[in-house]
Image (tube, helix red, strand yellow):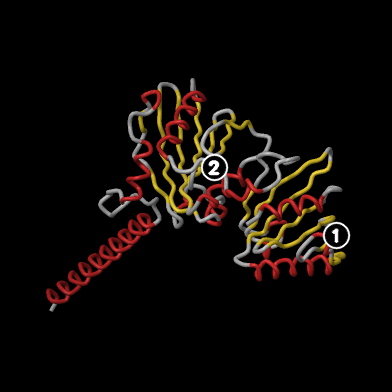
């Protein structure tokens, strides 16, 4: 009896140890899988790059300026993993239909460089995110559709890509310029800003103030998406807003919502002399506004100058 009981106790201990080991192994495997799923996109489970990643990585193929050498394999991020690279800043990229990010670090002599190539869904989206991060006061350079530089930074827009380069160490600034020119040549595609901007008045325009806003232009969700451009005459600065609707009926609805907003927050009156759906409005928060429609567009001028009506007319005539 004693031996039988002892054997049973030994068997129970072995079963307990085996169960605990199995649980630990299962938890470890689950942790590894979770970490793997949260990692930047690096291609297939075998580590091979998919077709789009190969195309992006090819932008940084050798030879490279300054005999730069990659410090590690390229990293790729998609809409599900972008937050891992720019936590807290990913939302605005996703708003502009971000698709892929190529990230890679390089070293050339004493200089260290980081290359980030953001692929957006279209040229308007690439312009939108680029414009959201630039200011008219930057030092602009001739690269891509538009670009600017600062100490240790060169950023530019081209086709549906937003390229951001940063560097430090001896000769880093010169190397950044060379990398920017190389990438621009390899990207190809269009090197122009969105066509609609070319239809807006150039006189008194604050250049490099142009924006493409997908969310809440002037604080109003119903106006999105819209182009916004600043104009200055003397000390007076105005904002021209061109809200892009899907059709004329939707544009009319947006104009009506804008009029309703000002009636409820201040005052708004019909102004047929401004053109189709013309209004003059004001409130204590936003100030004065004049607006009209043209086909699928709502054209509004915030804080208009004395010739504001002429500006609206000129914009309307140039829009398709």
Say above or below: 254 vs 28: below
User: In screen coordinates, is 27 left or right of 83?
Assistant: left
Residue designated by label 2: 192
Residue 177 vs residue 10, the one in the foreground:
177
Which residue in the rendered view is the most extreme toward the front? 317
Residue designated by label 1: 282
Mark 1 or 2: in front is 2
Image position, residue 55 (x, y; %)? 34, 45
- Give residue 292's quadrant in the image: bottom right
CB atoms of marks 1 and 2 within 8 Å: no
Is tag 1's residue or tag 2's residue first in the polypeptide sequence?
A: 2
Q: Quadrant of the N terminus?
A: bottom left
Q: How many marks?
A: 2
Image position, residue 183 (x, y; %)? 43, 35
Rendered residue at 74%/69% (across/down)? 257
Q: CA distance from mark 1 to mark 2?
A: 36 Å
User: In screen coordinates, is 33 left or right of 112?
Assistant: left
Which label is found at residue 320?
none
* Number of other residues with Cα within 10 Å of mark 1, as a class: few under 14, some 14 to 19, many 20 or more: many
Q: Quadrant of the C terminus?
A: bottom right
């Amino acid at each position: 009896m004693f031996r039988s009981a002892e054997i049973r106790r030994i068997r129970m201990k072995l079963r307990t140890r085996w169960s605990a080991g199995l649980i630990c192994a299962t938890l470890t495997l689950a942790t590894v899988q979770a970490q793997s799923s949260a990692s930047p996109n690096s291609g297939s489970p075998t580590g091979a790059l998919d077709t789009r990643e190969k195309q992006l990585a090819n932008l940084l193929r050798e030879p490279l300026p300054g005999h730069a050498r990659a410090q590690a394999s390229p990293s790729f991020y998609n809409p599900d993993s972008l937050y891992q690279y720019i936590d807290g800043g990913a939302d605005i990229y996703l708003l502009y239909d971000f698709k892929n990010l190529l990230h890679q670090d390089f070293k050339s002599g004493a200089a260290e460089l980081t290359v980030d190539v953001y692929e957006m869904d279209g040229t308007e989206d690439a312009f939108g995110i680029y414009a959201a991060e630039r200011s008219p006061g930057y030092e602009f350079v001739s690269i891509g559709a538009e670009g600017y530089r600062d100490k240790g930074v060169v950023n530019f827009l081209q086709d549906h890509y937003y390229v951001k380069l940063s560097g430090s160490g001896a000769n880093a600034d010169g190397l950044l310029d060379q990398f920017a020119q190389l990438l621009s040549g390899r990207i190809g595609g269009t090197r122009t800003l969105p066509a609609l901007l070319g239809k807006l008045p150039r006189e008194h325009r604050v250049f490099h103030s142009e924006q493409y806003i997908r969310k809440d232009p002037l604080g109003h969700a119903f106006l999105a998406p819209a182009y916004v451009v600043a104009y200055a005459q003397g000390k007076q600065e105005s904002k021209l807003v061109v809200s892009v609707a899907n059709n004329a009926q939707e544009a009319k609805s947006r104009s009506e919502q804008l009029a309703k907003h000002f009636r409820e927050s201040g005052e708004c009156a019909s102004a047929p002399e401004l053109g189709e759906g013309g209004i003059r409005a004001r409130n204590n928060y936003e100030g004065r506004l004049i607006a009209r429609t043209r086909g699928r567009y709502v054209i509004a001028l915030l804080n208009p100058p004395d010739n504001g009506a002429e500006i609206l007319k000129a914009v309307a005539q140039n829009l398709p």
